[in-house]
Amino acid sequence: MTTKNPRARGRPRRFDPEAAIAIAQRLFHVRGYDAVSVADLTEALGINPPSFYAAFGSKAGLYARTLGRYTAAEGIPLDEILRPGRPVAEALAAVLEEAARRYAADPTAAGCLVIEGTRCNAPEAREAARALSSAAEDKIRHFVAATHPDAAERLADYVVTLMTGLSGMAREGHGLDRLLATARLAGQAIAQAFPA
């Protein structure tokens, strides 16, 4: 005589979209957008493809949500660092040092999820990352323009270029000491060009 396995009692486990976004964020950060498939995501989230598409619309849709979560929780707090009245060189040096710290904080998910996403192959995902990157660049530019309007464009370009380089070097395995040394050297250069 055989008996069937009894069904689990109680309500079925509910899908938690916020937990799913956190899991997806980790996958995208560790591997990069292009290397993560929908199959990878559904397996990691414990859902089937129809449920995935119902919840997120697409891989790029989920990625955009992970970018929003990342910038809110783990992104560089530009509003806090770029306070009105703070000397430009001091503030920009602080941005670069904070970037170095955050990009090196987790060697398995190094670099900036947003910056690295600006180079992915999928146009929709790339544009989502570029929109956030552009917004950060605009904040830096507006901060500098308040006291040094003629230098705002080139200083914003310089800082964003350095942040991109720091992210890339972190992805290549450079540790915090090396990233901070680079950020501090750049901070010194800004201080010499724009003394308080």
Image (tube, rainbow, N blue to C red):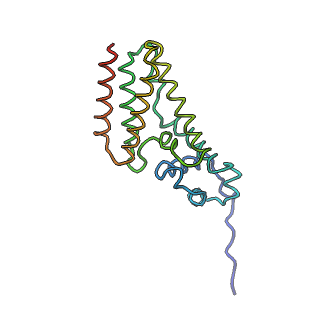
Q: Residue at x 36, y 37 (%)?
A: 101
In the rendering, at what x and y percent does residue 81 appear? 43, 24
Vertical placement of residue 11 versus 187, above or below = below
In the rendering, at what x and y percent does residue 171 appear? 39, 47
Report the residue that reaches farthest toward the bottom.
Answer: 1
Vertical placement of residue 121 versus 69, above or below = below
In the rendering, at what x and y percent does residue 169 appear? 36, 43
**Which quadrant would the C terminus be assigned to in this image?**
top left
Q: Identify which residue, 72 or 99, lies in the foreground.
A: 99
Q: Which quadrant would residue 91 be assigned to in this image?
A: top left
With 140 as the anchor, is 89 left or right in this view? left
Q: Residue at x 47, y 37 (%)?
A: 74
Q: Residue at x 47, y 26 (%)?
A: 78
With 190 as the anchor, is 59 left or right in this view? right
With 155 as the anchor, is 124 left or right in this view? right
Q: How many marks?
A: 0
**Which quadrant would the N terminus be assigned to in this image?**
bottom right
